[in-house]
Amino acid sequence: MEIDSVQKYLDIIEKLKHNYTYEEPACPNILFPKQVYMPKFIFRGHGDHENYKILPGIFRTHNPPHGVIATMYSQMEYHVLHDFISEACRYVKDVSVSDIPAWLEIAQHFGVPTRLLDFTENPLVALYFACSDLTDRQASVWIINEFAYNKIFFNEAVTVSAEISQRRITRIITDEIVYYNSRNCNDASYVQYPWIYKPCYREERMNLQSSIFMLWGARRQELTSFMESKYFMSDENDIKNQEYGVICNILIPGDKKRELLEQLNLCGINEKFIYPGLDGVGRFIKQKYSDRGSK
């Protein structure tokens, strides 16, 4: 799937939503005769499709050699986060130093390598990030069907309770970061796969970007390595994998990035929106006049 306009991009997303909406008959003696499953998409854009891996920063930055046990890696990860908390706690006074999930999110927000990966619920925000580098490299937007993902990898119903989500987040952080146990990732008691959740929006940027996080579990592998071929979604008319559609990507030619950014600007998606405050205003003015000079 490849696009050259915002409209075509949105058309593909609508087609995917249509393709992966399906019905299942209810069990006997249930009040409602059928259950309708509609996709819930989250998005991540990146400017270099060929070289990018869907993998958190700490695993990309410090990739252990094959055979290194989880303990050695988790020790390093804990120290990265602990050092950040030690340095940043005097600036962030409303978060307890013992609230590790909150500090993990704060560290991610300020560029510290963590096991979190940013996604968004807004497809236009993801497209902006895919195009914003303005290089000639092919870009892409990855799309995850959160409902299908949770059903396949966690055997969860369509709606996951806040209690279940918080329990999984706490378990991953406790096992993988805080205690860095010596058991390896094949231990069935570990949360194996990345967990998707919506964080508390502590600042306006997260709100405007409609932030969603994926928190990696015991398996320190890129997301696509978990995916069988039947899990990839398609915008074709005749599909066979409605119940299994989890992931796909939309490609963006490098020479279309500037044009797409101009279209996004007409939709109100620009530096001012993505980065609220003076930082975003400065970026917006710089981009506005550099565009003018290039025409």
Image (tube, rainbow, N blue to C red):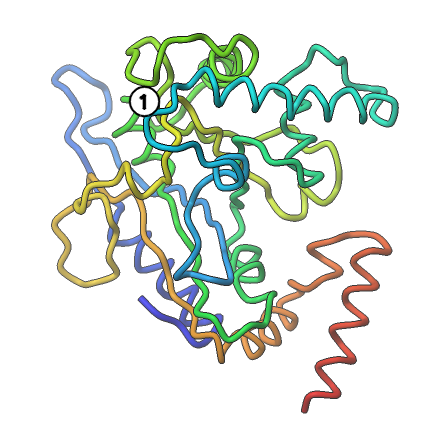
Q: Residue furthest bottom?
A: 295
The reply, left or right, for residue 138 in relation to residue 24 is right
- Amino acid of disc 1: Glu
Please name the residue shown 64% across and 63% down the image: 269
- The one nearer the camera, 9 or 257, is 257
* Residue 85 image offset from top left, x and y in percent: 74, 22
* Residue 14 image offset from top left, x and y in percent: 36, 59
Query: Mark 1 falls on what kind of element?
Result: loop
Q: Quadrant of the C terminus?
A: bottom right
Please name the residue shown 41% across and 52% down the image: 142
Residue under pointer 1: 156
- The one nearer the camera, 252 or 121, is 252
* Residue 230 image offset from top left, x and y in percent: 17, 45
Please name the residue shown 41% across and 29% down the image: 194
- The one nearer the camera, 7 or 258, is 258
The reply, left or right, for residue 229 in relation to residue 9 is left
Crowding near the residue tagged with mark 1, few <14, some 14–19, many ≥20 C-alpha atoms within 10 Å: some
Q: Quadrant of the N terminus?
A: bottom left
- The one nearer the camera, 40 or 181, is 181
* Residue 37 image offset from top left, x and y in percent: 28, 37
Q: Quadrant of residue 95?
A: top right
Please name the residue shown 69% across and 19% down the image: 82
Q: Is residue 74 above or below residue 295?
A: above
